[in-house]
Image (cartoon, helix red, strand yellow):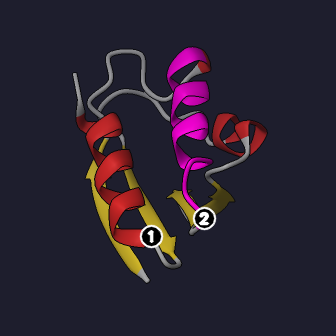
Amino acid sequence: MVEKELTVQLETGLQARPAAKFVQEANRFSSDVFLEKDGKRVNAKSIMGVMSLAIGSNEVVKLQAEGPDEEQAMDSLVTLIESE
């Protein structure tokens, strides 16, 4: 398992369209991917789960990936979250 704590750089946070893009990207990988904020952990492949976290800009989240392509999933999703 790999995990990383990061700050969301997206101007609108991880809401609506950026959340959908994030979930779509997470679903490209066979690894299990989770997103955690304030102790609440959700499946990053679930749009409802990601939206329920209400992640705003400049908030700190933890991203976890476990599986055969965990490194690729982590790299891709970190890039998506940290892009401005």
Q: Over which residues does the magenta segment extend? A: 17-30
Q: Position of residue 51 (x, y in %)?
A: 67, 34
Q: Position of residue 43 (x, y in %)?
A: 68, 58
Q: Nearer the viewer, residue 42 or 38?
A: 42
In magenta stretch: residue 25: yes
Is residue 71 positioned above or below 59 on the image? below
Secondary structure at badge 2 equals loop
Q: Position of residue 12 (x, y in %)?
A: 41, 16
Asked if disc 2 and disc 1 are in contact, CB closer than 8 Å, the reply is yes
Residue 69's label in the rendered image is: 1
Q: Residue at x 61, y 52 (%)?
A: 44
- Under mark 2, the amino acid is Ser
Is residue 20 positioned above or below 5 on the image? above
Q: In the rendered view of the protein, which quadrant contains the N terminus?
A: bottom left
Residue 30's label in the rendered image is: 2
Whole-number angstrom distance, CA of label 2 to CA of label 1: 7 Å
Q: Residue at x 48, y 70 (%)?
A: 65
Considering every residue shown, the one lying at the far right of the view is 48
